[in-house]
């Protein structure tokens, strides 16, 4: 039991670090923090479970936002909470149907979540942000899904969670 918890925590740490590496691959947007940072968190939600996935995606996002001097200020923590909710929804709907999971999470992360910028920059910032965020969300979710599927197929004893 202890060995499995240690393995899960170590993997969470690796995935959080991988989030930072993914953030270095940028997708053009009005806010420079959009990249491939959430793929590791979305993968964690599928592979490790709801809570570890939510923790990985939130901590990964907070580290990346911190390295960019928290461009959204205190709204950064609300965005991290939105990312957690999106990761949980992604896992839930992915288990029903992978396309449904990707679709719903893309809409949540790319269209619904950026509504938080309305008090900061109004509709102009929101409309400018959504296209690149939808593309980045879909790409991150797709990558997480592919990696999860490959791991699932390669390991016959794979149970879906450590």
Image: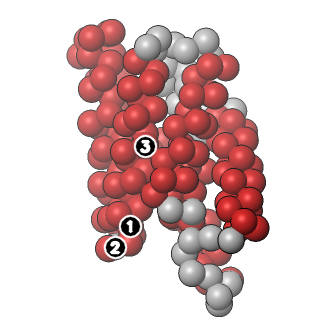
Q: Quadrant of the C terminus?
A: bottom right
Looking at the image, tell me whether mark 1 or mark 3 is earlier in sequence order. 3
Query: Residue 57 versus residue 71: which sits nearer the camera?
Result: 57
What percent of the width, then of the height, locates residue 95?
Answer: 38, 72
- Count of marks placed on residues: 3
Looking at the image, tell me whether mark 3 or mark 2 is earlier in sequence order. 3
Question: What residue sits 62% from the left and 19% below the top?
Answer: 66
What percent of the width, then of the height, locates residue 151?
Answer: 65, 75
Query: Residue 53 versus residue 38: which sits nearer the camera?
Result: 53
Question: What residue sits 58% from the left and 36% below the top?
Answer: 59
Q: Give the distance between the C-alpha atoms of the residues marked 3 and 2, in whole angstroms.
A: 20 Å
Which numbered disc covers residue 84? 3
What percent of the width, then of the height, locates residue 136?
Answer: 48, 41
Query: Neighbour class for label 1 at 10 Å: few (<14), some, many (≥20)?
Result: some
The residue indicated by pointer 1 is 94
User: Which structural element holds mark 2?
Assistant: loop
Q: Quadrant of the N terminus?
A: bottom right
Q: Is residue 122 left or right of residue 110?
A: left
Q: Give the distance between the C-alpha atoms of the residues marked 1 and 3, in whole angstroms.
A: 15 Å
The answer to whether any part of residue 15 appears in the image is yes
Query: Neighbour class for label 2 at 10 Å: few (<14), some, many (≥20)?
Result: few
User: Which structural element holds mark 3?
Assistant: helix
The residue indicated by pointer 2 is 97
Q: Is residue 93 left or right of residue 142?
A: left
Give the foreground label among 3 and 2. Answer: 3
Query: Neighbour class for label 3 at 10 Å: few (<14), some, many (≥20)?
Result: many
Question: What residue sits 65% from the left and 88% below the top?
Answer: 157
The residue lying furthest to the bottom in this view is: 156
Q: Give the distance between the C-alpha atoms of the residues marked 2 and 1, in whole angstroms.
A: 5 Å
Query: Residue 83 versus residue 115: which sits nearer the camera?
Result: 83
């Amino acid at each position: 039991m202890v060995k499995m918890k240690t393995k899960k925590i170590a993997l969470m740490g690796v995935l959080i670090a991988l989030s930072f590496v993914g953030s270095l691959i940028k997708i053009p947007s009005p806010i420079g923090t959009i990249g491939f940072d959430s793929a590791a968190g979305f993968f964690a939600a599928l592979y490790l479970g709801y809570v570890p996935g939510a923790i990985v995606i939130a901590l990964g996002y907070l580290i990346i936002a911190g390295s960019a001097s928290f461009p959204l200020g205190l709204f950064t923590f609300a965005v991290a909470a939105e990312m957690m909710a999106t990761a949980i929804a992604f896992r839930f709907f992915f288990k029903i149907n992978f396309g449904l999971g990707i679709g719903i999470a893309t809409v949540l992360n790319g269209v619904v979540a950026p509504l938080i910028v309305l008090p900061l920059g109004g509709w102009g910032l929101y409309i400018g942000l959504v296209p690149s965020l939808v593309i980045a969300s879909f790409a991150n979710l797709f990558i997480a899904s592919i990696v999860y599927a490959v791991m699932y197929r390669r390991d016959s004893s794979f149970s879906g969670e450590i």
